[in-house]
Image (cartoon, helix red, strand yellow):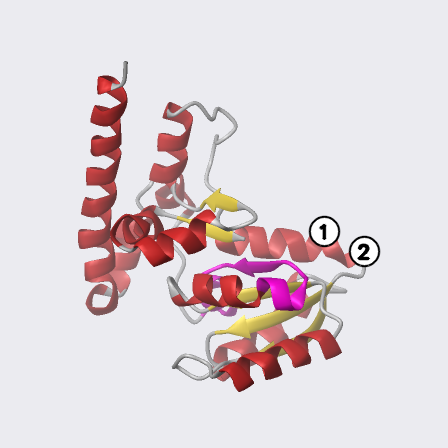
Amino acid sequence: MHLCNAYTLSLALRDADYRRIVDAGDLNFADGFPVAAVGRRRGHPSMTRRVYGPDLFLDVLREGVGRRTRHYLYGSTQAVLDLMKERLPRLVPGVQIVGAEAPPFRPLTPAEQAAVGERVRDAAADIVWVGLGTPKQDSFVADMRDALGVPLVAVGAAFDFVAETKPMAPAWMQRTGLEWLFRLATEPRRLWKRYLVGNTVFLWGVLSDELRLRRRP
């Protein structure tokens, strides 16, 4: 499962391999105000709002308490995961976190991938939450989905937001599609290219599609 925002789709426009990964997802949700708005315009009225990663993460954890759903956290850093393991039982009483690991900041070897799969299976996890950032997390989901046989959900920076190691945009900025501006202001060096270039490519893709659809007989 992938959460798609303007940056995700801008990458898919530029990278055919990444586009195939996203297209092959079991479920792709609009994690962005502009993506949901374009979806409604293109005939999907149910896309009334974005599917925000941190909200999806916490909502599913809460819903799974009564079902005794077993969750595995994969991604970010060990410091963030340690904070998550402290905070989640307070935020979601009864939640079952059966594993948490921070991978190295490089591609895994085949042997390392196999070892991750073995740890997830040994933990009897029902859902694996992946917080590696785009596009790394999407590649991990595609590589591991068939081997694990359980849902893998790529939730981006949700781990950092829940652990409160990064500030979350105010609700009004999220509702009005301005979260990107908040995040750019808080992490300009890391995110300037993502938002300034990525958003421009996304808008170009939307306009190109509009022109193509208008020319269609």
Q: Say if 211 sits above or below 89 in the image.
A: above
Question: What stretch of residues is rendered in magenta?
Answer: 145-164
Q: Residue at x 25, y 52 (%)?
A: 14
Horizontal side, residue 145 vs residue 216: left or right: right
Left or right: 12 in relation to 95: left
* Residue shown at 22% from the left, 19% from the top: 215
SS class, disc 1:
helix
The residue that label 1 is drawn on is 63
Of residues 97 and 114, the one nearer the viewer is 114
Pointers 2 and 1 in contact (C-beta within 8 Å) = yes
Q: Which mark is residue 96?
A: none
Measuring from the top left, give residue 196's x and y in whole percent.
Answer: 18, 53
**How packed is label 2: few (under 14 Cα within 10 Å), some, or many (20 or more)?**
few
Place residue 113 in its image quadrant: bottom right
x, y percent for residue 27: 55, 46
Residue 216: x and y, percent? 27, 18
**Residue 41, quarter of the rendered image:** top left
Q: Amino acid at mark 2?
A: Arg
Q: Which residue is mark 2?
A: 67
Q: Secondary structure at mark 2?
A: loop
Q: Residue at x 41, y 35 (%)?
A: 36
- For residue 93, above or below residue 104: above
Q: Is residue 166 magenta?
A: no
Q: With 122 as the anchor, is 169 left or right in this view? A: left
Q: CA distance from mark 2 to mark 1?
A: 8 Å
Badge 1 crowding class, 10 Å Cα cut-off, few under 14, some 14 to 19, many 20 or more, is: few
